[in-house]
């Protein structure tokens, strides 16, 4: 693609090895480069100068919008965390989106402002003031050294690869689900559905819990504080193999749930479950 038809942005999501490995698989991304954003030096040497580890990307705007890019970024970060992602701690691991194009920044800010939890988001959106390309040893690091450590799980790094399908995956963003009982939610989502807790935050002991859970490439957000819909809302979750998912659930009998498969559902084979807060989850093999 002609470079004049692309747009350039810089994304920070913690250690750049994993961020580059993830964003290079996204539809509409045509170029990636590991680097440092918004430091004060033009050199890779010397004392830390305030930079954020980042990935410089070029996108085809006809395929990938800034809003969608932000959605992808929020899949791989803890958006509430300040200067920490996974085990990596320090100012250089802060999260953000940077650009020389004010329109990009306006769109990214609008994405955050539209969220119910906007006041808690620690992702910075700023003009790019400085960029330094990282050393060659950091370029496409995980592609060259796949056994190196990374704060992102392999199934997430591979989620959007066109040559691989995950057994369970979410396409469109899933709403934040309200939970009334933390213990019941953990029993349902973690013990029964076998999701793993990716991160959780309770900003003070008496404040609401925010939790992100994941199974394979499927991601759900739970909150004691708010939800995108009232409890009892219906959420469609695309899956690859309804029979395999149903068989897996059958290995762990639940005291009140006996899910079946509706093979005549309009969207395709569907497994319907209701969580302890009344949210209805419909795992559909061909859901959009």
Image (cartoon, rainbow, N blue to C red):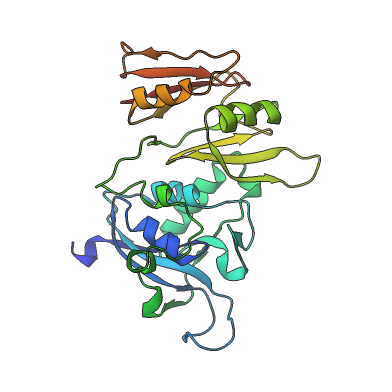
Looking at the picture, how far across and down is residue 201, in whole percent?
68, 46
In the drawing, does residue 150 fall left or right of residue 243?
right
Looking at the picture, how far across and down is residue 283, in whole percent?
41, 24
Which residue shows up at 70% across the image and 26% down it? 181
162 and 106: which one is in front? 162
**Quarter in which the C terminus is drawn:** top left
Query: Is 205 above or below relative to 180?
Result: below
**Number of marks drawn:** 0
User: Would residue 176 be visible to someone looking at this image?
Assistant: yes
Which residue shows up at 23% across the image and 61% down it? 5
Q: Residue furthest front?
A: 251
Query: Is 76 above or below relative to 181?
Result: below
In the drawing, does residue 18 fall left or right of residue 200?
left
Q: Residue furthest bottom?
A: 46
Which residue shows up at 30% across the image and 40% down it? 165
In the drawing, does residue 36 fall left or right of residue 200?
left
Looking at the picture, how far across and down is residue 191, in whole percent?
59, 30
In the drawing, does residue 228 fall left or right of residue 17?
right
User: Would residue 100 be visible to someone looking at this image?
Assistant: no
**Quarter in which the N terminus is drawn:** bottom left
Looking at the picture, how far across and down is residue 286, in whole percent?
30, 26
Q: Residue furthest left?
A: 1
Which residue shows up at 46% across the image and 66% down it? 16
Query: Is 281 above or below relative to 137?
Result: above
């Amino acid at each position: 693609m002609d470079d004049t038809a692309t747009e350039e942005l810089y994304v920070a999501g913690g250690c750049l090895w994993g961020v580059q490995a993830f964003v290079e698989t996204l539809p509409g991304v045509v170029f990636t480069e590991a680097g440092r954003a918004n430091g004060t030096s033009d050199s890779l040497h010397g004392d830390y100068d305030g930079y954020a580890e980042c990935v410089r990307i070029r996108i085809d705007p006809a395929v990938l919008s800034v809003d969608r890019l932000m959605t992808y970024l929020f899949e791989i970060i803890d958006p509430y965390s300040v200067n920490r992602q996974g085990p990596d701690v320090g100012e250089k691991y802060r999260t953000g989106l940077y650009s020389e194009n004010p329109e990009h920044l306006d769109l990214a800010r609008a994405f955050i402002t539209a969220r119910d939890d906007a006041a808690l988001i620690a992702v910075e959106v700023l003009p790019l003031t400085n960029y330094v390309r990282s050393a060659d040893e950091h370029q496409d690091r995980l592609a060259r050294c796949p056994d190196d450590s990374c704060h992102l799980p392999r199934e997430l790094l591979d989620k959007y690869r066109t040559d691989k399908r995950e057994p369970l995956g979410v396409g469109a963003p899933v709403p934040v689900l309200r939970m009334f009982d933390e213990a019941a939610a953990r029993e349902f989502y973690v013990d029964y559905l076998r999701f793993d807790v990716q991160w959780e935050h309770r900003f003070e002991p008496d404040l609401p819990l925010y939790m992100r859970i994941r199974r394979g490439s499927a991601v759900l957000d739970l909150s004691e504080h708010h939800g995108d819909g009232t409890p009892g809302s219906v959420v469609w979750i695309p899956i690859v193999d309804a029979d395999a998912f149903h068989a897996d659930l059958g290995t762990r009998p639940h005291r009140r749930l006996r899910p079946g498969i509706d093979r005549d559902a309009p969207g395709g084979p569907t497994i319907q479950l209701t969580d302890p807060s009344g949210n209805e989850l419909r795992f559909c093999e061909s859901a959009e």
